[in-house]
Amino acid sequence: MTTASALETLASPQAGHPEWLWRSGDLVPWEQAAVHVNAVGHASVAAVFEGVKAYLAADGERLLVFRLDDHLRRLADSARLCRLSLPHPADELHRAVVDLLTLNGYREDTYLRPWAFPRGIIREQMVPSGAVCEVIIDSWPFRSALDTERGCRAAVSSWLRVGEHSAPPRAKAFSNYHNGRLALMEARENGHDWPVMLNERHKVSEGAGACLALVRDGVAVTPSLTSGVLPGITRDTALVLLRDLGIPVEEREVDRTELYLADEIFFMGTAWEVLPVTTIDGLTVRDGTPGPVTRALSRAYGRLVRGEDDRHPQWITEVPLS
Ligand SMILES: Cc1ncc(COP(=O)(O)O)c(C=O)c1O
């Protein structure tokens, strides 16, 4: 079974770089996309981003960008929550993604990262409210793990997920990821793959880069959006697919001990897709293999992102192969 670290390798940009990036309105060669060294620092703390995937369609003839407009909407939401000004409207960014996929000539599953950071040299510790951003769109190939038998060992972290009392959990802000990073390092040091974070009320929130759900007695349960989670687009997709599959779904507060009694647990995220949890705090979930609901959801998600399920056409942006 593939482990979590293999998952990271599959999604890693280390393998190379694209020929072209999109930068603040222009398609620019990778080598020319430089910033002054002094632009790194406080500006990075205020940066926001998205993670989007384009899947090669099952017919091998098109790339299908999954829920692009929802990701761009969340990018705008993140900028608003962090009081940044994005000078590019969503339709321009939508076209930029399509142009970039075409120009780079991708013919395989591709990960896209639109991100925004305050423009210029910012020496102030407190990046001013309304700071105008540069927007970059990076991309790299990834291999989907949807057809792979895999699982991960998860553990509840002693680090609480950033909450409404400290930093906006609904923002996909780089600064929030230090929180998940600390939890991840703790999990790895203790022999697990991924952390599960509790919120400030000590209810289950989410993973370090993915939402979470459990299944008990045939009902799928996921922490509500007021549990300190990023409003996950995969989470939202999974809720629709589970209902399509006839599986009842609950969005509510989830206790830590519900995880220990669950028949199935899985993470959900753009990068992670549907990742089964095989142990939680050392307790084996089911028999340590993915359960029927996780498998059915994973199959349905795979069919959807590869264009084999035409019930949700509004979620797919088609890009012909160049
Ligand atoms: C902290 C966090 N939670 C949840 C998710 C899952 O969100 P999505 O399904 O939109 O990728 C992500 C990934 O973007 C994330 O970084």
Image (cartoon, rainbow, N blue to C red):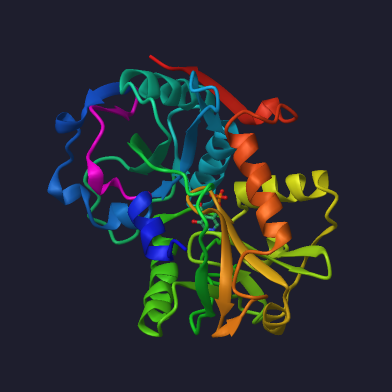
Q: Is residue 134 magenta?
A: no
* Residue 224 found in image quarter: bottom right
Q: What residue is drawn where x is 24% and y is 24%?
A: 28
Q: Position of residue 105 (x, y in %)?
A: 33, 21
**159 to the left or right of 245:** left
Residue 67, image x, y percentages: 59, 35
Q: Nearer the viewer, residue 119 or 218?
A: 218
| Image vertical order of residue 231 relative to residue 116, above or below | below
Q: Which residues are magenta?
A: 11-25
Q: Is residue 272 above or below residue 114?
A: below
State whether residue 229 appears in this view.
Answer: no
Q: Is residue 114 left or right of residue 19?
A: right
Query: Which residue occupies 36% across, 26% down?
Result: 106
Q: Is residue 97 above or below residue 70?
A: above
For image coordinates 24% across by 57% down, the residue present is 41
Q: Nearer the viewer, residue 192 or 93?
A: 192
Q: Which x, y percent locates residue 279?
A: 56, 77
Q: Position of residue 110 (x, y in %)?
A: 41, 35
Quadrant housing the C terminus: top left
Q: Please tell me which residue lies in front, 230 or 139.
A: 139
Residue 77 appears left or right of 215: left
Image: 214 above or below 308: below
Q: Residue at x 54, y 59 (%)?
A: 210
**Would residue 248 be visible to someone looking at this image?**
yes
Whether residue 22 appears in magenta in the rendering, the answer is yes
Residue 131, by quadrant, is top left
Q: Please state if 268 lies on the left or on the right of 216 as rendered.
A: left
Instruction: Count every numbered label the image shows and give the total.
Output: 0
